[in-house]
């Protein structure tokens, strides 16, 4: 009875934490360019057109990602209406689901306290909070890969329900494939293959019910891919070979990587994405490989392989984005939960040799940066480019430094529970400071809701926007309109030479002053770093 009561308390605490971190004020910030507006507009088009097979953006088929994320967003629009809250709800729910899965897995293989600590660490990691609050595929993909790999872990230690867990594993893999393509199969394969090889248990592959897995994956994922190929001949060739192999291997032309970065790119990404917990990750990994290797019913090394397999795989890819390594964070959170369980179960003990120095070093670094920036004031132009006031950023740095300093003090004086709670507050502070203080001023610079809606009111119903400088997808979402890009100065001038009055929405990366928009046209309205220009003067 006491055990069930503790589980109920843990579950309630995790739910409240996730609702606060992932869903509070979810629609307060505008949808921003680039990508957020595009993904929201794709779901909006799906609802309006009734075509639930081919995702479309700006009336053109969108081949870069599969359909499941769009289906869920479109369903949210049907139920709640098209809004920023509804557009972000899928990612927020996926973040909550990943945290609960981490708690359940940690409780099962370690202890309830370890699961709870791991859930808190995952929920308060900087990248997890951020990606649970944006219109992006990555959190949903991470939820399904996490579900798949946890199901496999349960299958390793549960003989009696092994078939059920393998069925869940294959269903989750199929849903991951519907979310982000072949990576949904490849990442679990790399993790499982690496683990079984290291444990010299490749014979376990015979127990994995592979024929059943083929049937489950085919039944869930194959129908949409086949319908998509039928509706858009050549889709599979582009999506599988050009999109995925091109991004991984690199090449020229259509095979060129979209986001080339150096091999070490993910080291600072992981450091920042898991702040503040990444400062202790090396110790947690080392403990799992040495002292704790047989803990968790032998699955500690499984989690280590999970972290390294994802990290190394994406480091080898020629195309890199900071969001790609998100699927390794649940495994890292579990190892960190195990590590912190040991610290908190030893009252009066000072944390391991790397923990306190890491936190203290971050405090010193932030304090130095804050002091330098306060004296030199090097970023005074920010309020011209991004709407961020220097005073707001300065206060942010002072408070962030103070939190790291306070955590260092607690750990130095062996008040480890207070240290853990303080560290848990750092990433939520960062996110909500941005949301409440910085985002309102940044909205006109990062998105185009206000100016897009003003321009839409001046255009005939259904007429497409004309953009120059950047495709402003947030304006398209909020006004439910398509757009035509005027890519060159020649195209811009030709359109503005029309005999009728016409309008163009411009964006500049320069400091937002009126001279930035100087040209052979009339500037009608400036909002943030965007302007409405016309070939004739006068109000809209």
Image: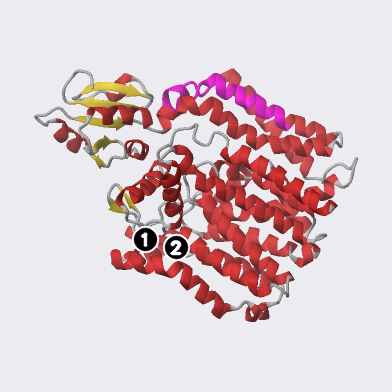
Q: Residue at x 44, y 45 (%)?
A: 79
Instruction: Using the rendered view, name the quadrant where residue 245 is placed.
Output: bottom left
- Dominant SS of magenta comes to helix
Which percent across, then down, holds residue 327? Answer: 58, 55
Q: Earlier in the sequence, mark 1 or mark 2?
A: 2
Q: Residue at x 32, y 53 (%)?
A: 50
Q: Is residue 501 magenta?
A: no
Q: Is residue 402 left or right of residue 74?
A: right
Q: Is residue 499 left or right of residue 474?
A: left
Q: Quadrant of the C terminus?
A: top left
Determine the secondary structure under disc 2.
helix
Q: Dot 1 corresponds to which residue? A: 255
Q: Are marks 1 and 2 in contact (CB under 8 Å)?
A: yes
Q: Residue 242: which disc?
A: none
Which percent across, then down, holds residue 10? Answer: 75, 47
> Can residue 377 be seen by looking at this rendering?
no
Determine the secondary structure under disc 1.
helix
Instruction: Using the rendered view, name the quadrant where residue 423 is placed.
Output: top right
Q: Which residues are magenta?
A: 377-404
Distance, label 1 to label 2, CA atoms, is 8 Å
Tell me if residue 420 comes above or below residue 336 in the rendering.
above
> Can residue 515 be seen by looking at this rendering?
yes
Q: Residue at x 61, y 33 (%)?
A: 430
Q: Residue 249: which disc?
A: 2
């Amino acid at each position: 009875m006491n055990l069930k009561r503790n589980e109920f308390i843990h579950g309630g605490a995790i739910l409240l934490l996730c609702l606060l971190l992932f869903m509070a004020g979810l629609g307060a910030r505008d949808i921003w360019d680039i990508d957020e507006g595009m993904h929201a507009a794709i779901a909006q088009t799906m609802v309006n057109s009734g075509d639930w097979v081919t995702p479309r953006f700006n009336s053109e088929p969108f081949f870069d990602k599969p359909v499941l994320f769009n289906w869920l967003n479109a369903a949210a629009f049907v139920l709640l209406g098209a809004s920023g809250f509804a557009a972000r709800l899928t990612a927020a729910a996926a973040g909550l689901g990943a945290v609960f899965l981490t708690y359940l897995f940690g409780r099962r293989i370690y202890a309830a306290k370890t699961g709870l600590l791991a859930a808190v660490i995952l929920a308060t990691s900087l990248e997890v909070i951020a990606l649970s609050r944006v219109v992006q595929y990555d959190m949903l993909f991470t939820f399904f890969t996490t579900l798949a790999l946890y199901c496999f872990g349960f299958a390793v230690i549960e003989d009696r329900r092994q078939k059920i867990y393998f069925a869940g594993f294959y269903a989750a893999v199929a849903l991951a494939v519907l979310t982000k393509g072949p990576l949904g199969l490849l990442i679990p394969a790399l993790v499982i293959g690496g683990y079984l090889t290291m444990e010299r248990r490749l014979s376990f592959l015979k127990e994995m019910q592979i024929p059943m897995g083929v049937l489950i994956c085919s039944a869930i994922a194959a129908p949409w891919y086949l319908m998509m190929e039928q509706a858009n001949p050549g889709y599979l060739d582009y999506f599988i070979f050009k999109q995925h192999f091109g991004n991984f291997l690199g090449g020229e032309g259509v095979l060129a990587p979209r986001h080339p970065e150096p091999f070490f790119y993910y080291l600072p990404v992981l450091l920042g994405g898991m702040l503040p917990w990444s400062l202790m990750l090396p110790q947690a990994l080392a403990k799992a490989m040495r002292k704790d290797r047989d803990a968790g019913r032998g699955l500690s090394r499984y989690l280590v392989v999970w972290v390294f397999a994802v990290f190394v795989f994406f480091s080898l890819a020629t195309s890199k984005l900071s969001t790609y390594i998100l699927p390794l964070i649940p495994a890292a959170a579990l190892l960190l939960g195990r590590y912190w369980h040991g610290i908190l179960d030893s009252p009066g003990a000072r944390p391991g040799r790397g923990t306190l120095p890491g936190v203290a070093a971050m405090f010193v670094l932030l304090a130095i940066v804050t002091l330098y920036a306060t004296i030199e004031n090097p970023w005074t132009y920010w309020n011209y480019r991004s709407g961020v006031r220097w005073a707001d950023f300065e206060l942010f740095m002072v408070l962030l430094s103070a939190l790291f300093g306070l955590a260092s003090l607690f750990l130095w004086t062996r008040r480890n529970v207070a240290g853990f709670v303080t560290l848990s507050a750092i990433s939520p502070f960062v996110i909500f400071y941005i949301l409440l203080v910085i985002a309102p001023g940044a909205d006109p610079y990062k998105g185009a809701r206000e100016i897009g809606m003003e321009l839409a009111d001046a255009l005939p119903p259904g007429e497409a926007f004309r953009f120059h400088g950047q495709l402003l997808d947030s304006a398209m979402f909020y006004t439910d309109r398509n757009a035509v890009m005027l890519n060159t100065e020649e195209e811009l001038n030709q359109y503005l030479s029309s005999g009728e009055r016409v309008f163009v929405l411009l964006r500049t990366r320069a400091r937002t002053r009126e001279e930035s928009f100087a040209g052979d046209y009339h500037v009608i309205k400036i909002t943030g770093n965007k302007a409405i220009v016309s070939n004739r003067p006068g109000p809209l």
